Structures are given as C-alpha cells and as structure tokens.
Image: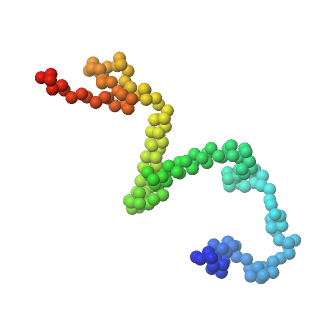
Amino acid sequence: MDLTNARATAAHTAAKPPVPIPQTERLRPPPADHLPKICQKPTITVRPGDLGKIDKYRQDRHYLDPAWQDAYRPGRANIEGLNGRAKSHGIDIADPRQRLAHGRVAQTILLALMILTINLGILLAWDQTTTETSSNAVPADSTTPNGLTPPPVIATGLPPPRRPPDATAN
C-alpha cells in the first residue's frame, strides 16, 4: 500500500470502520440528541470493576505522574535491558539466521536455548562482579583426600606455571 496516495490509503481495509455504517447515515448523520449516550460525551468515567474481564489492564496511577514513574520505570528499565542483551550482536534472537532449524517446535527449542545462554551470561557477570578474587584461592592448610597439598592459586584462579626441570641437576 502506498501511504503517500490518500485515495489508496482510504480504500485499504485497515482504514475502514469495523462496523459498516449505512450509506444514508454516512451522508446524513442523525442529530446529536438522537445518538447513543456514549456518542454525546467527549469522555467517560470507568470505575474499578466496571471493565469486567479486562479489568486487569486498568492502571491505578495516572500516566507519567511521579507515583506512576516510581512504579513502572524500574520494571521497564529491566525489560529493556534484557531486550537489549537478547538482541545484541552476541546472541541476536531477532535474526532468523541464528535459528536455521525448520519447524515451530525446533525454533521454540532453539529460542529457549538462546535465552538460557543469555541468562547464564547474566548470572556469570553477576557472579564475577559480586565475588572477591581471593575467594577462588585455596586455603593454605587444605589438603586433598590423598594427603597432598594442591599447588598455590594466583589471582587469575589458575595455578602458576610449572618451572622446567633444571638441566644442571643431572
């Protein structure tokens, strides 16, 4: 559909009302006092419980008030942060080339595995920022079950490199 063409845009099915209005009513609309009550008021008041099944979508705070911002900003920031991680260059769940398996089930399983790796990355990053580097070191008095003392551990968490045997000792 060409959005620059007003005629084509108006003729598109998305531009038509969901309930067809009779042609006579469209050309000669009824007077305002004959319209239903909902059509005569610019706004309506919806009280808690008036919405029935869709009452769960109601917000008790006014949009963008400080109370609304305090309630929704942290959650929204977390959601957007996770979306940013999921669509980053490392794991791009939006790119279908990352999930080349055919079928809905295979795609769902691969997407679940991709999200699992994202969560593991988040947990690893959290663990690396909250644990101290000295907690990876082995206490000096600890021994293995066979009675041997393990080699010392340096700050990277790896044992130091072994020295080659001295050639003059032979």
- Picture layout, residue 125 above or below residue 18: above
Residue at horizontal 80%, vertical 56%?
Answer: 45
Image quarter of the C terminus: top left
The outermost residue toward the top is: 141
**Residue 1 drawn above or below residue 57:** below
In the foreground, 5 or 93:
5
In terms of image quadrants, where is residue 155?
A: top left
Q: Is 113 on the left or on the right of 45, as rendered?
A: left
Q: Looking at the image, which is closer to me, 167 or 7?
A: 167
Q: Is residue 77 left or right of residue 163?
A: right
Q: Position of residue 49 (x, y in %)?
A: 74, 51
- Would you identify the image quadrant in which residue 31 lies? bottom right
Q: Residue at x 25, y 28 (%)?
A: 162
Screen quadrant of the N terminus: bottom right
Residue drawn at point x = 74 percent, y = 50 percent? 62
Is residue 69 shown above or below 157? below
Q: Is residue 104 visible?
A: no
Where does residue 48 sit, x and y in percent of width and height? 75, 50
Residue 169 at least partly seen: yes
Count of labels in the image: 0
